[in-house]
Amino acid sequence: MQEFTDRLSVSKSLEFDFDSNEIWEIISEPGNLNLTHPFCESNEAFQWDKEGRSDRLVYLNGLNYIRNFITWDEGLGYTLLIGEEDGPKSYVVWEIDSLEGRKSKLTITVYPYILDKIPYLLAKFAHAVWVRPRLRKYLESVLSGYGYYLKNQKRTPRNHFGKHPWFS
């Protein structure tokens, strides 16, 4: 995994007024992005069992990504690779932390492939001014989609937290 974790990353966390078991229950459900993700057109599981997990995420703009889950730590989180079927992949870490008073925190960290092939100093600049702001907004919307779903017990409306230039 070091080939992925050496990349520049973007991380975002959100605290929830739900315990970690409730967070795990929704993020580990096959097809859960259909209910929670504000930029998801569809989310179909190919495989979702003890042998492995993979699914397809089609964004509102038609971008078609495959997610292949690498690790699965029951109740704690998982890691996955995401990207076009035969294209480069980003590495993503989902982590749940229990907090006091039946609260929890969900953190998503993305190690994007987008700047992987350019010189480090140029990549660092592009990451700071272009990738990080957009990816943070994306992660904030994704996390907020889980909050919306858990609080309201209904599907998160598409583009509910604003449109995104990469995925809407």
Image: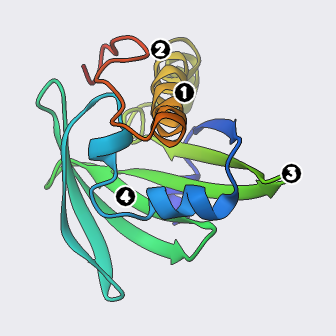
> Label 3 sits on what residue type?
Gly
> Label 2 sits on what residue type?
Trp
Q: Determine the image quadrant of residue 61.
A: top left
Relative to 113, is 25 on the left or the right?
Answer: right
**Contact between labelled residues 4 and 3, with CB atoms less than 8 Å apart:** no
**Which type of secondary structure does the marked residue at label 1 adopt?**
helix
The residue beneath circle 3 is: 101
Residue 74 on image: x %, y %: 56, 77
Residue 117 on image: x %, y %: 37, 38
**Contact between labelled residues 4 and 2, with CB atoms less than 8 Å apart:** no
The residue beneath circle 4 is: 81
Residue 41 on image: x %, y %: 17, 35
Q: Residue 140: which disc?
A: 1
Separation of residues labelled 3 and 2 (CA atoms): 38 Å
**Which type of secondary structure does the marked residue at label 2 adopt?**
helix
* Placement of 98 over or under 33, stated as above or below: below
Crowding near the residue tagged with mark 2, few <14, some 14–19, many ≥20 C-alpha atoms within 10 Å: few
Q: Which residue is drawn at 31% across and 24% down?
A: 157
Separation of residues labelled 4 and 1 (CA atoms): 20 Å
Separation of residues labelled 3 and 4 (CA atoms): 33 Å
